Amino acid sequence: MDVQTSNLKHVRKAAGLTQAQLAQRTGVSRQTIIATERGDYAPSVYLALRIARSLETTVEEIFSLQEEA
């Protein structure tokens, strides 16, 4: 299974937050948010929960599992 993070950027922008603001709220670097949005980094469960809480949504709204072909 592969983690898909394509919704993070959309949800973050809809919440009116910059990458830097989300990074500050979740206690990580802006580079971590950038890498997560690009799909280069799969966040831990704890970080995924902090991101979802900061964006007032669910983890499932932002991150999903997709079976590899």
Image (cartoon, helix red, strand yellow):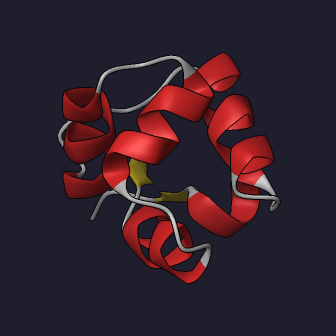
Pick whichever, 43 or 51, lies toward us. 51
Where does the image place residue 34, in percent across and percent down from the top left?
Answer: 22, 45
Is 1 on the left-hand or right-hand side of 69?
A: right
Task: Compare residues 48 and 31 and report the one nearer the observer.
Answer: 31
Give the mark count: 0
Q: Measuring from the top left, give residue 11's x and y in whole percent.
A: 55, 73
* Residue at image coords 45%, 78%: 10
Front position in the image: 15 or 44: 15
Is residue 44 positioned above or below 17 on the image?
above
10 to 9, vertically: above or below? below
Residue 1 makes an appearance in the image: no
Which image quarter holds the C terminus? bottom left
Q: Which residue does the image show at 58% across and 27% down from the upper left? A: 26
Q: Quadrant of the N terminus?
A: top left
The answer to whether 17 appears left or right of 54 in the picture is: left
Q: Is residue 9 above or below residue 34?
A: below
Q: Is residue 6 shown above or below 34?
A: below
Confirm whether residue 65 shows in the render: yes
Residue placed most toward the observer, 3 or 9: 9
User: Residue 12: x percent and y percent?
Assistant: 51, 66
Residue 47 horizontal side relative to residue 24, left or right: right
Q: Residue at x 56, y 56 (%)?
A: 63
Q: Residue at x 81, y 57 (%)?
A: 58
Q: Residue 42 appears in which quarter of the rendering? A: top left
- Report x, y in % for residue 3: 42, 48
